[in-house]
Amino acid sequence: MNVEKVFATEAQRLRDKRPGISSVPLCLRGLTSVLLFALVVLLPLLAFAAPENAEPVCIECHSKLPEKYSQPVTLWRGSIHAENGIFCNGCHGGDPKDAANAMSPARGFLGVPKEDAIPAFCGRCHVGVLKDYLNSAHGRKLAHGGPTCVTCHGSHQVVKASLELINEKSCSRCHSYERAKVIRAAMQETEALIVAIESRISGYKMTGTDTAKLEQELFAVRNRFHTLFHNVNVELVKQESAGIQADLKKIKVVLDRFDDSRQRRAIAGAVAVSVMLLIALLLHLLRKTFD
Amino acid sequence: MDNSSRRTFLGLCLGGLGAVAAAAFSWPLFRYLAPRTGSDAAGKVVIPAADVREGEAKFFEYAGSSAVLVRKRGGDLVAFSAVCTHLGCIVQWEKDKQDFLCPCHGGHFSADGSVTAGPPPKPLNKLPFSVSGDSITVG
């Protein structure tokens, strides 16, 4: 690689130089240039050289096929799976790097699951949700044309779950909305807390605060909460909501501490600036006494 | 006021402000470098040994998060943070398989905490513990 060659030549030139009293500043200058060169040129090159989450061959082929086969790709691009680097092979199996054998069962290709196999298909990753779903009124109807994961979540444009998924238009495709409406109402308060906390965490993240632990905690609580819906049991939702809200309160306490700390820092900053200005004024007055 | 006494006054004021500025700079530095006090005892959790039966797990709260003690078949004890290293969900103990399962994305961990399947990038975090008589102290 040319850049590496230039780097190696520069390094060799520096090594060949005999260090002496007169050459020290030159050496330092050379070393500084090499370091700057490495920082400015090599790091961005390295970042481009090894792209993460390279798209699988499935996308390349399917994007060029008629709509029936290309639409899943278009839909997937707007999904939470795409957002988190879960590609076609994450669900459908197969070899994502070998176009000729991408759909070979020998390479683990599973294809499209049959209707009643969908929950088990999705449940390979979403194990907790599968368990709750199978125990629910929805899951018990699985072999009799009951709803599966894709009935509510869609099959490729799977978006981040929210209470918006429970709505009259969607639920009344199969039954009346009344029961779902009660469950949604029971979940509304906790959902609002989750959304508010998520927004506060996101605000702190934008300003450079380390929010990784809080994000993980919120993810775990939200997942537990949304999984709860799959039971389709109002009483259970009400029972569990108290515990979930208590866990959310713990995250809220940490965020409140962040707020306090930010306020204290703002005051300390204002005091520090005032003291510096005062020192500058006093120094100015002191200088004037020598005029 | 003549220049000399003005200089003395301004010098005193500057000295005072300089001392305040130095203290304001040093105090957070000192607090950052000074060892924490009192956290050791507060971080310990004592669990009766009888609560952790062979092949079973005992979940408890440790340092503001979920933790688990497991007595493996054969009697060996292990303690871990119960927080999945993938996205932070709380793992479940599967007694029949003698492993941990994360209900969120199907991560599996062995009874030793190492990843056996799924997306977790690293093993469960081990917690220090000691056994004394009939009780187990974690932390």
Image: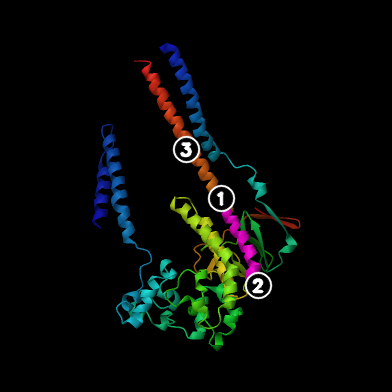
The residue under label 3 is A269
Image location of residue A210, percent across then percent down = 49, 52
Q: Tag 2: residue type?
A: Glu
Residue A190 falls left or right of residue A56: right
The residue under label 1 is A256
Helix, strand or loop at disc 3?
Answer: helix
Q: Earlier in the sequence, mark 3 or mark 1?
A: 1
Image location of residue A214, percent across then percent down = 53, 56
Q: Nearer the viewer, residue A239 or B71?
A: A239
What segment is highlighted magenta in the picture? A235-252
CA gap between label 3 and label 1 equals 20 Å
Magenta region, main secondary structure: helix
Q: Earlier in the sequence, mark 2 or mark 3?
A: 2
Chain ID, mark 2: A
Specify whether disc 3 shares its chain with disc 1. yes
Above or below residue A245? Residue B139 is: above
Q: Tell me where residue A278 sits by quadrant.
A: top left
> Residue at left 36%, top 15%?
A290
